[in-house]
Amino acid sequence: MNGHNYPNSVVQYLDPGPDSVSYNLGRHWRMLNMTLGLSDKSTGNEAVQFQLTADDRIIYTEDFKLGQSKYVKLNVTGVLRLDLTATLASDYIGDVYADWCSAELVS
């Protein structure tokens, strides 16, 4: 993303999507840190909405276009189930990859 390689990333291919992945955090973590954005392999005219849901409660949502990214730190204290959902927020033109980069859980 933006010319950088990120370890420990979740990549969702939207064709056209949405796509979601769930994690059981077991109420063992305090913070989730990561960088969000579209992979450099994505088509240039696409926009994607990133949404994080903790135990059926939205804790983060934001739209990104190619070339945009953001580092986020989210409080996940007491969360059992975490859902990462990427949804196309533009007309589907081509390949779209939503990247949840260098995701790190902190206790």
Image (spheres, rainbow, N blue to C red):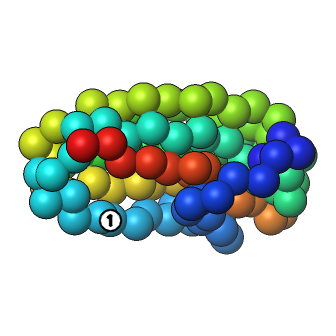
The residue at the point 42 percent across, 29 percent down is 73
Q: Give the residue number, with chain letter if any, for mark 1.
A: 22
Residue 48, placed above or below residue 98: above
- The one nearer the camera, 79 or 13, is 79
Q: Position of residue 6 (x, y in %)?
A: 69, 53
The residue at the point 65 percent across, 68 percent down is 13
- The one nearer the camera, 87 or 57, is 57
Q: Is residue 88 left or right of residue 47?
A: left
Q: Position of residue 40 (x, y in %)?
A: 85, 52
Residue 87, placed above or below residue 89: below
Q: Is residue 72 left or right of residue 36?
A: left
> Residue 76 occupies which quadrant of the picture?
top left
Quadrant assignment for the C terminus: top left
Residue 34, placed above or below residue 9: above
The residue at the point 60 percent across, 41 percent down is 36
- The one nearer the camera, 21 or 19, is 21
Task: Please identify the residue farthest to the front as the structure is shown.
Answer: 107
Q: Position of residue 52 (x, y in %)?
A: 37, 44
Q: Position of residue 26 (x, y in %)?
A: 13, 60
The residue at the point 62 percent across, 63 percent down is 11
> Residue 20 occupies which quadrant of the picture?
bottom left
